[in-house]
Amino acid sequence: MNFSDSEIVASILSGKGFLSTNSIAEADIILINTCSVRDHAEQRVKKRLQQILSGKKKNPGLIIGLLGCMAERIKTVLLEEEHFLDVVAGPDAYRDLPNLLKQVEAGHRGVNTLLSLEETYADIAPVRTGNNGITAFISIMRGCDNHCSYCVVPAARGHERSRDPASVLQEASALFDQGYREVTLLGQNVNSYLWKEGTRKILFADLLAQVASISPLLRIRFATSHPKDLSDVLLETITKYPAICRAIHLPVQSGSSRILQLMNRNYTREDYLKRIEAIRRTIPDCAMSTDIISGFCDETEEDHRMTLTLMEKVSFDYAFMFKYSERQLTPAAKSLQDNVPEQVKNRRLREVIALQQKLSLQSNRADRGKVFEVLTEGESRRSREHLMGRTASNKVVVFPTKSAKPGTYVNVRILNYSSATLLGEVVEG
């Protein structure tokens, strides 16, 4: 979401005559787009702000701004403690940035952290900054109404609202015409996408089918799904369109029904496993990934063990794993105790990571000898002699450069593997 928001900000400012630079030393204005989901992200932002502050000492006219969720969540603290900040703008205030910058030029702070019930930035064509020209993100909705007890998104991004599907289709079509070959539809909970036109309702499955009809050469991904809203209709839609990647990111967060209830996730361990069964039944070759939080409030060793057993039962291809960090303004911070010792959180997280590395290795080992269609994205990070791309199941594949170029589809036979990467060779014909 932050990448998408940054591209929206770039579009708004470029439309008012501002120019971007890749050199921070040349910048007259530095805007940091932030996330508040986890404490680690906020600590990185604060460290970055202190680094940038040294630049302001050398150049007093430098304008420094903080955007996004962190600006919304702790705006009062920021304004009281970070006296060098010139602009503070929440995620629904990006259109106001040119005006806020004018306020700074007039000698005042520019502050707007008002949340909106309607803002989706649907009419703004994002400026694609820092991407590979092959893959792109399309935000189809903003905000969230789920109110998971650990999550700050409802407080930081507001009420859930969906974009006009026509604007989504227009953006996806334009990207394809520009040479992009993969788009990811983004939302805090894409499954709950809903657009109403009179008596007509367009659900996420409908939107997904429309985008997938643009071209069979345009791969479609989506994130993030909520287990309670992953419908059979959506699964059937995926099977009907080859352009929709057979990969679903389905955050579980915990394998314990007791902890899931404390998290206000609105499903049980059994409910989640039934959704997994439905996916395996409908899309047998579907790759599965997830999010896991270790050390949530009141989590016991038994709860932790249940997370490990669920991971083994599902055998996720990969996962995003974190230890719990309490967030202000969340229901958990207000009514639950963050009572799992830090060393216990760290140990449990290590065990989760170790198990997932084992599962990822098993998953990649099973691909050895198989041939996959890979969308080439660019050079490998480690060697200019190799390219990297992804399979439809979102696995990274590295292969020699001589037989392909970025933006093309190639068939690659897998020769070797690690827990994170597949290594292969291009198969001609």
Image (cartoon, helix red, strand yellow):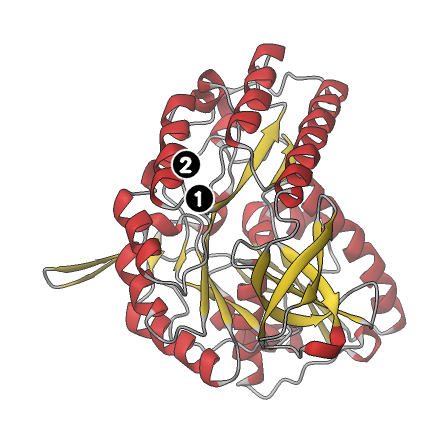
Q: Name the residue: 58% across, 63% down.
A: 3
What whole-number distance in Å separates the C-alpha atoms at marks 2 and 1?
6 Å
Using the image, determine if residue 77 lies above or below residue 87: above
Q: Which residue is mark 2?
A: 147
Going from the N terminus, do you reach mark 2 or mark 1 first? Answer: 2
Q: Position of residue 171 (x, y in %)?
A: 41, 76
Quadrant of image for the C terminus? bottom right
Assess whether mark 1 and mark 2 are in contact (beta carbons under 8 angstroms): yes
Using the image, determine if residue 59 lies above or below residue 119: below
Q: Name the residue: 53% across, 85% down.
A: 15
Can residue 55 be spotted in the picture? Answer: yes
**Tag shown at residue 337:** none
Q: Position of residue 102 (x, y in %)?
A: 59, 78
Front-most of 4 and 335?
4
Q: In the image, what residue type sits under mark 2?
A: His
Residue furthest bottom as drawn: 17
Q: Which residue is mark 1?
A: 154
Front-most of 416 and 99?
416
* Residue 357 placement, left or right of 314: right
Mark 1, residues whose alpha carbon is within 10 Å: few (<14), some, or many (≥20)?
A: some
Q: Name the residue: 32% across, 71% down.
A: 213
Where, by quadrant of the figure, is residue 238 drawn? bottom left
